[in-house]
Amino acid sequence: MNFKRPRGTADILPDDQPYWGKVYNTARKVAHQFGYRRIDTPTFEDTNLFERGVGNETDIVQKEMYSFDDHGGDMITLRPEGTASVCRAYIENGMHNLPQPVRLFYAAAMFRYERPQAGRVRQFHQFGVEAIGDPSPEVDAEVIELGWKYIADLGIKDVTLRINSLGDAEGRADYINDLDKYFLGVVDQLPKVDQDRLKRAPLRVLDSKARETQALADAAPKSVDYITGEAKEHWEVLLVLLDNLKQAYPDFSYTVDHRLVRGLDYYNRTVFEFEPADAGSQGTLIAGGRYDPLMGILGGQETPGIGFAGGLERLIMELKKQELPVKASKGPDVVVVTLGDAGSAGSTLAAGLRAKDISTVLAPKRSMKAQMRYANSQNALNVVILGDREVENGVASVKSLGEGGAQSEVTLDAAAIAEHVRSTGNQ
């Protein structure tokens, strides 16, 4: 019987862990620099949370969710995205009583039933941030800056920020009505999938990946022409703030893209995406926007919010494509090599070194040459060689595997060997 991983999932093997360490560690560092604190929510939630929050007409709810009845008869869904879960946690845990905005970040696995392809899998991982409780354009600029700095700190170059405003509900109805009329006038030129989208949600036709639809969408009504009042003022101030970011980040730039929308129902006003220069259909690195209606949709009090999520698999693909260096996994401080009947003494020494916080591996019992090859294969910094003579004389031979390869005799004592390893800088 041959078992294989489920389609659309991946084994993250040790050789790839340095990339995952880089995207996780950089996410944590940048989030903390902006005052965001970590939140973890359950891997599965009540299905209604996503049906209400994400929207019944979205592809996620219609086609992609992993939903099932549990043994108690409750309908459960593996989370397909992070924002609805974070907002549910905000409401349920009374976080409106905290100083606002509440700044939160997460790094977690998400699940969607999709056709697997490069950059799109069924179990994927996201780094996301949410700033909840402040409607100001300054917070929008902060979240966008955070996304930019995250990508920049990873070392990824040639990234474009696309931004748009969907406005508020007041102007949205007129906009969608005119958008619907426009696409109905060219409906025979749309592919079947976009004709179906037009019937359900005209706005999502703008998000189509079909080239013929994109060409038609370029001439479609523009959402920014329909925003008025506070929404218009919010948009204009945000553009000024983004222009000001260029003082701190000389490479920062953005493009207003009138075709940019979000595929989830809860977005309003600001929406944005970060893409590499040669992005394909699955090239978006980070996508987000403002979701002021979401708290009310989920049964909480009206509370503004904005956030983004970045797919870690796609970020890692970009790191590899741009051949950006990552720090190799560190090997053990010490590999203990034993000869003759010194196996027991070697095992005892290894335990003593670990107790002194020296990472230590006991080489498999083979020839001296084979054990040294093993130590090199583990990227060990040092080997401690123990044979019958060393045990009898109460010493150990400590050899650095770094440049120069100095070798010393040290008292056969875990504390003494630990001190020697630290003092020579070979840890």
Image (tube, rainbow, N blue to C red):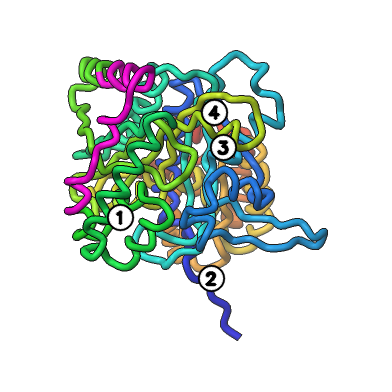
Residue 238 is covered by the magenta coloring: yes
Label of residue 104 in the image: 4
Percent of width and height locating residue 46: 69, 49
Q: Which residue is mark 3?
A: 417
Badge 2 element: loop
Q: Which residue is mark 2?
A: 5
Above-or-below relation of 233 to 37: above
Q: Quadrant of residue 275?
A: top left
Percent of width and height locating residue 126: 47, 45
Q: What separation in Å lies between label 1 and label 4 (alpha carbons)?
A: 31 Å
Mark 1 or 2, nearer chain start: 2
Above-or-below relation of 212 to 224: below
Residue 135 is covered by the magenta coloring: no
Front position among marks 1 and 2: 1
Q: What separation in Å lies between label 1 and label 2 (alpha carbons)?
A: 31 Å
Q: Amino acid at mark 1?
A: Ser
Residue at x 40%, y 26% (from the top left corner)? 143
Which segment did they paint magenta?
A: 215-239
Front position among marks 2 and 4: 4
Q: What separation in Å lies between label 4 and label 3 (alpha carbons)?
A: 44 Å
Residue at x 47%, y 59% (from the top left corner)? 13
Q: Are marks 2 and 3 in contact (CB under 8 Å)?
A: no
Badge 1 element: loop
Mark 2 or 4, nearer chain start: 2
Above-or-below relation of 202 to 133: below
